[in-house]
């Protein structure tokens, strides 16, 4: 017997419809590329999202067509979030920090039809547009009078001119909630980047779970600052959860420095902010220097990389701000765990409580997880046994876009590439990473790519790239090199060799020359051994 409840597809358009109807005056505040502060409401965003939808229809873009963005966090980007997905197209958020060659590869792979970009990124567009073979329309996210007379980009139009002529009336189409809504490429594994393709259903369920009290705890009384970029896994779903709850949204635009972020928190009475540790490191540094205090900030979610204990202490003890340590991945939309306390922890002394807070947290409803040994046998949740962490749930991928890399699942579970323990209360803690990548300031660097460039130098016999703990960037790559017999090579010459071959921030910080790199039985480089050998290593600048 079937239930007799209304069957309504979970579609992203319903979020902006809800926000417009129930929180029409809810504020969206953005620091713009132009430098000023822009204010609007959910009502405005809803109207302009419908204009975007009409503009896309007008261009005869089909259901499922990819519309790319290369943009900071801001109201126009938010309008694209709703206008593109709501009208049945797929929003593809490109990461501007990637090397232009990677951007070209990704845009061609996803077969983007339109690219909307902030003017900050005009130089990137000028460099890549002729190689982006599927993009038919370039749209600059600015007013018509900010468009340069000779941009060098054929047919470039301004976003404001593009939507101005369109009606703000539009009936959002109804379709299957499993249809694709947005996509995000990750270079978190080796080989070419691969895309997670989110659906309307997965996005709504994720936003719903993310808003729960023991997750990010979002409400209409919050003023939310997503410092995490909208090009990184949809800013952890915050734009959707905000529309669902009517929370005020505050967007930092391109100004991610400590001073700008602090000022925005104060001026917009931010209660909740989200970002990677590096961002908070810069902001805390600015506050310490100026003896500053927060007046409204209550909670901050920190994820993307492990949160250092000193950061939790500083936020909590010095500034009275609760830190929610969180873990997730692009492949998980991204939320997997959030570290909120259970009743039993609230009476613990500070030192024991800190041990819990340092963990990546417990699963939120919707995500199941397990740890397994090398044979795939499940390990106990005793807080000691560590193994490969696997997850499953309705907002975890089942495969990558275009089936790249084959089926990633093992018996229906997605292997995260993280190594973890889980304690009897269900708190997961990452202890290591089995994937060969380095995370610097929240962005991935493939150690294989770094090694391959070094290996292409005629004086290099063998190269191993490893990530070393770094006070500002969490991890930075260094490359350990064995020279060919009789070959001459200096540190500076090898670092210069990287120029132009990869993005600047992906160039290793240092070169360490050695006679031999430890190898395992199968001839594979033993990076754990190498890390042990270099345990006293200091960065040249540190
Ligand atoms: P991404 O797909 O870029 O979001 O990166 C996901 C990966 O970042 C995870 O698989 C982890 O390796 C790492 N990561 C994310 N959050 C944390 C955290 N709180 N602590 C440690 N590592 C994390």
Image: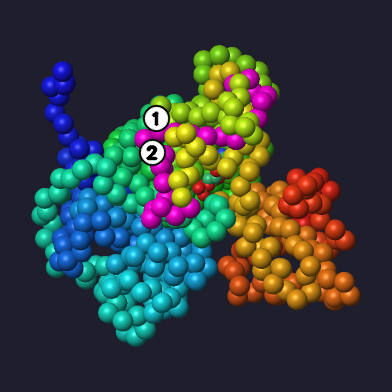
Q: Please provide percent x and percent y for residue 320.
A: 55, 32
Q: Which residue is mark 1?
A: 366
The span picked out in magenta is 381-405
Q: Is residue 3 visible?
A: yes
Mark 1 secondary-structure assignment: loop
- Residue at 33% x, 40% y is 202
Task: Tell me if mark 1 has few (under 14), some (14-19) or many (20+) residues whose alpha carbon lies within 10 angstroms of its own.
Answer: some
Q: What is the image's colouring? A: rainbow
Instruction: Give the CA distance from mark 1 to mark 2.
Output: 8 Å
> Does 507 appear in magenta?
no
Q: Please provide percent x and percent y for residue 26.
A: 26, 43
Classify residue 518 as left or right of residue 278.
Answer: right
Residue 376 is drawn in which quadrant? top right
User: Do callouts 1 and 2 mark residues in contact (Cβ within 8 Å)?
Assistant: yes
The disc at residue 125 is: none
Quadrant position of the N terminus in the picture: top left
Q: Which residue is mark 2?
A: 395
């Amino acid at each position: 017997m079937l239930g007799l409840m209304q069957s309504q597809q979970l579609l992203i358009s319903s979020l902006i419809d809800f926000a417009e109807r129930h929180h029409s005056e809810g504020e969206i505040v953005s620091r713009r590329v132009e430098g000023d502060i822009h204010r609007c409401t959910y009502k405005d965003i809803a109207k302009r999202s419908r204009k975007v939808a009409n503009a896309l229809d007008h261009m005869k873009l089909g259901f499922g067509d990819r519309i790319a963005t290369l943009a900071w966090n801001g109201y126009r980007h938010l309008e694209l979030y709703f206008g593109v997905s709501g009208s049945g197209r797929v929003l593809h958020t490109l990461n501007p920090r990637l090397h232009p060659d990677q951007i070209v590869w990704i845009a061609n792979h996803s077969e983007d039809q339109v690219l909307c970009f902030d003017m900050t990124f005009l130089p990137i567009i000028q460099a890549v547009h002729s190689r982006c073979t599927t993009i038919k329309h370039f749209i600059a996210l600015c007013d018509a009078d900010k468009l340069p007379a000779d941009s060098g980009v054929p047919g470039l139009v301004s976003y404001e001119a593009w939507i101005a002529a369109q009606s703000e009336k539009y009936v959002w189409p109804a379709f299957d909630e499993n249809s694709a809504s947005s996509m995000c490429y990750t270079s978190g594994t080796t080989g070419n980047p691969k895309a997670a393709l989110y659906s309307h259903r997965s996005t709504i369920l994720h936003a719903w779970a993310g808003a729960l009290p023991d997750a990010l705890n979002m409400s209409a009384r919050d003023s939310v600052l997503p410092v995490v970029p909208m090009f990184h896994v949809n800013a952890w779903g915050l734009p959707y959860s905000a529309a669902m709850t009517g929370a005020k949204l505050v967007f930092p635009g391109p100004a991610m420095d400590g001073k700008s972020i602090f000022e925005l928190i104060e001026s917009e009475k931010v209660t909740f902010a989200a970002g990677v540790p590096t961002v908070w490191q810069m902001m805390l540094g600015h506050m310490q220097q100026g003896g500053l205090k927060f007046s409204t900030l209550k909670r901050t979610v920190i994820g993307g990389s492990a949160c250092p204990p000193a950061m939790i202490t500083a936020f909590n003890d010095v500034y009275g701000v609760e830190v929610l340590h969180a873990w997730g991945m692009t492949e998980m939309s991204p939320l997997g765990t959030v570290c909120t306390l259970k009743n039993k922890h609230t009476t613990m002394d500070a030192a024991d409580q800190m041990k819990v807070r340092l963990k990546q947290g417990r699963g939120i409803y919707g995500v199941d997880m397990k740890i397994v040994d090398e044979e795939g046998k499940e390990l106990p949740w005793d807080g000691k046994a560590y193994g490969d962490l696997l997850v499953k749930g309705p907002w975890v991928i089942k495969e990558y876009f275009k089936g790249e890399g084959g089926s990633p699942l093992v018996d229906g579970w997605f292997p995260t590439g993280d190594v973890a323990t889980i304690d009897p209360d269900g708190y997961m803690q990452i202890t290591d990473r089995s994937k060969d990548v380095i995370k610097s300031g929240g962005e991935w660097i493939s150690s294989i790519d770094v090694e391959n460039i070094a290996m292409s130098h005629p004086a290099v016999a063998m190269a191993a790239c490893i990530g070393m703990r770094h006070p500002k960037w969490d991890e930075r790559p260094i490359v350990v090199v064995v020279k060919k017999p009789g070959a001459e090579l200096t540190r500076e010459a090898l670092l210069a060799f990287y120029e132009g071959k990869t993005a600047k921030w992906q160039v290793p910080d240092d070169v360490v020359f050695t006679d031999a790199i430890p190898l395992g039985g199968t001839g594979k480089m033993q990076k754990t051994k190498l890390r042990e050998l270099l345990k006293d290593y200091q960065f040249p600048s540190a």
